[in-house]
Amino acid sequence: MSLHRPDTLGGRAAIAGIGATEFSKDSGRSELKLAVEAVHAALDDAGLCPQDVDGLITFTMDTSPEITLAQAAGIGELGFFSRIHYGGGAACATVQQAAMAVATGVAEVVVCYRAFNERSVHRFGAGLDARSPSAEGTAMGWTMPFGLLTPASWVALAAQRYLHTYGLTPDAFGPVAVADRRHAATNPAAYFYGRPITLAEHRASRWIVEPLRLLDCCQETDGGQALVVTSVERARDLRRPPAVVAAAAQGAGRAQEAMTSFYRDGLTGLPEMGVVARQLWRNSGLGPADIDTAVLYDHFTPFVLMQLEEFGFCGPGEAADFAADGGLELGGRLPVNTHGGQLGEAYLHGMNGIAEAVRQVRGSSVNQLRDVRHVLVTAGTGVPTSGLLLSGDR
Amino acid sequence: MTDATARPGQQTEPDYRAYEGRPAATGGRSPDAVNAPMIRHWCEAMGDTDPAHRGPGAVAPPAMLQVWTMAGLGGPNAGDGSRSGAYDELLTRLDESGCRAVVATDCEQRYLRPLRIGERVLFDAVIESVSPEKRTALGTGHFVTTRTDLRAYDEARGEKPEEATPVATHRFRILKYRPAARQEQAGSGRKPPGRRPRPVVNRDNEGFWAGVAEGELRFQRCTHCGTARFPWLPGCNVCGSPDWTAEAASGGGTVYSSVVVHHPLAAAFDRPYAVALVELDEGVRIVSNVVGLPPGEVRIGLPVRLSFERCDDELTLPLFRPAGPDRLPELRVAVTRTLIVAGAVATRDYQDVHHDAEAARAKGSPDIFMNILTSIGLVGRYVGDWAGTGAGIGGIALRLGVPAYPGDELRFNGVATTDDSGQLTVSVIGSSDRGNHVTATVAVTLPAADPRTAAVTEPGRGTVA
């Protein structure tokens, strides 16, 4: 792939299987066990078995190494294995790298997985208290003594500047939360199944880090999600219709940091997502008008607004208007996060969102839209990130 | 946290709201007319040197208001007999329910005109509200709010009580509570201070922290292309050059963005706190804290000035304080046993917890502590010093936080803002190492000719908390 010329990855690989554990607040089992269950479920969905797998990809943050996952899942020799960095920014890149492997013949069946007990064991929201003096630890160390310690606080610092620049109030974030929770309310797999919220409830929820309220923040979840990637040709012979990888991209901006990119430009956008957007549009030949539904990474609501702008669904500063009045809901301008997102369904570091995009392409979502041809999926925001365009097989 | 519901096994709580609207004091009369000796004692205790409170034509310090109506050593029922049966009955019922402890939490005084020497103060008070049962850090109990209306007439010049004219209103809130089971605390009862996370220091940024140790905030400048940069890195993002020099920042800056952290509160912070992204005058940004004003008032665009602040025995950090004409100079007051006792006596407050350490300990306090009337006095003096002798103080609203004990140092900081109607308000925080002792807003009128009347501009829109 290249920042400067279209790549040749589009149309050569597909997601052929998806599988997840239940999404809970206390799984009662190990992260490795969750990963194995998710991988088996995804292989089952594809109609494949562990012996078919020759590649594995996960996140550097995952605690289940590829070799241990293979050992416990009945997978044999591996010809390709990789892990991707930067937290939730890795999500779509796992599929990108799997697609590159199958497109080049490096591997035939690659499973991407992510599993954790993020609620019951290691809560990201609890915050940091120390970091080692590595380059990465030192980058985070510039903010820690001053009490900027949690993901919500890092996002809030950019969100405040966004509100200030465009003359908005924290109420601007409400429609994102309402859309997510409305979609989750009709999704039995969602933690917040049957529990929609209103704008008034959003406004009344307590401050976590001003300008972010409780209902601007995603859940913390125990669970696992896996995705099976293979060639489009092979996927056509499997149990489910292929969700073709029409384009895939990673992106990091100039002077990029992981969650603390406070020292560059105006803090009103996500330049790294702009890098992803430009590549996805160019590589696929598609544009915002071609997208039927999007899964936009939503650990915190403000970054959903910024993503709408980075992808050109609206202009800079216009996303709050775009999202108001149900713009992100079923039947709206751009239905977003039809599974309920990470606020409503589960926080699985973005991997559950890729599964929902696959369901929309297959026509099997609980909130299925009509005639879906192209779905945009994004990965973690505020970090070096990635994105996918998934399309039906024509 | 509140919990107004009765729990099983407990009697339904009495409905104290029946007392709302009933008098707390009727026909009260100050034991003494406004007089020079009491004013002088008060000014000495507070450190108030305003000449307006001395000599012929002297006026009483506004913040001294409540002193004139204090009952004194004999207690409320040995005084002028104004205390109402309803108020006594309410306090007795609260005592009987187990809410025997009392602490003043906040007050709001509005001054209508100055009190002159020779004037006699008359007052009536009403029970404005009694809260449902509330759980607080001190214990569970009820907030009782009274409002006092004060009038005065010039007895020395032969005026009659009927000629008294309004001088002030005064709202006062106390908490009557059952003390929470108290954990035995070492020494002075200081809570073990949480420590801020330590800086992360390596070979690439050690020059920055060496600068902090020497009282400088240093950023890097590329010697090849001249670009200033922060955070510290071993090369330039613009041109890739490895060559750089360190420069000390001038210390001026502007808040570029800010947040208020409510949850979770890190160990070093016991209440919501502001974190700001400050853009230095040299063009680079740094994440830090703006201290010296309430967190909600740290707003984008606020001019700030670098200030090295000691956070604990091992850590000094480059923090920022509001800059410009709207920031008051800091006042540091050593809280000695003498100050606490002198303040209590000068304000005619003979509660034993303000002068008798043994009695204070018997009531669960680690030592004697400053009374609220002294805290009001110090705030009044602090703002008065800044406003100058020709200025008027229109009112003080004040809330108490952590107590002030002997050995503490109170640091008063204030920021002046002018709202759309032209009202000048000074927000004051008086804090010690324990946290904020007092948070107050003071309404000020400067003489029309005072250049600060024009120079003071709002640092950020919105009302002052």
Image (spheres, coloured by chain):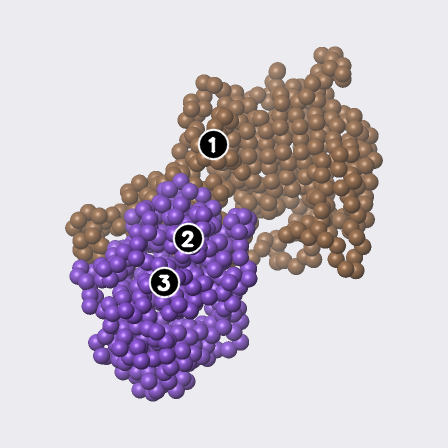
Chain colours: A purple, B brown
Q: Which residue is mark 3?
A: A371
The answer to which quarter of the image holds residue B299 is top left
Read off the chain for label 1: B
Secondary element at image label 1? strand
Q: Is residue B188 visible?
A: yes
Position of B380 with respect to A306 (left or right) is: right
Position of B175 with respect to A68 (left or right) is: right
Above/below status of B301 relative to B189: above
Which amino acid type corresponds to the residue marked 3 in the rendered image?
Asp
Q: Is residue B364 visible?
A: no
Position of B48 with respect to B353 (left or right) is: left
Q: How far apart are the two marked residues, 2 and 3, measured between alpha carbons?
A: 15 Å
Q: Nearer the viewer, residue B93 or A383?
A: A383
Establish whether labels 1 and 3 are both on one chain: no
Read off the chain for label 2: A
Q: Which mark lies nearer to you, 1 or 2? A: 2
Position of B190 with respect to A286 (left or right) is: right
| Residue at the image position 26 percent from the left and 60 percent from the top | A280
Which amino acid type corresponds to the residue marked 1 in the rendered image?
Thr
Q: Which residue is mark 1?
A: B417
Q: Nearer the viewer, residue A303 or B273?
A: A303
Which numbered marker is on residue A332?
2
Secondary element at image label 2? loop
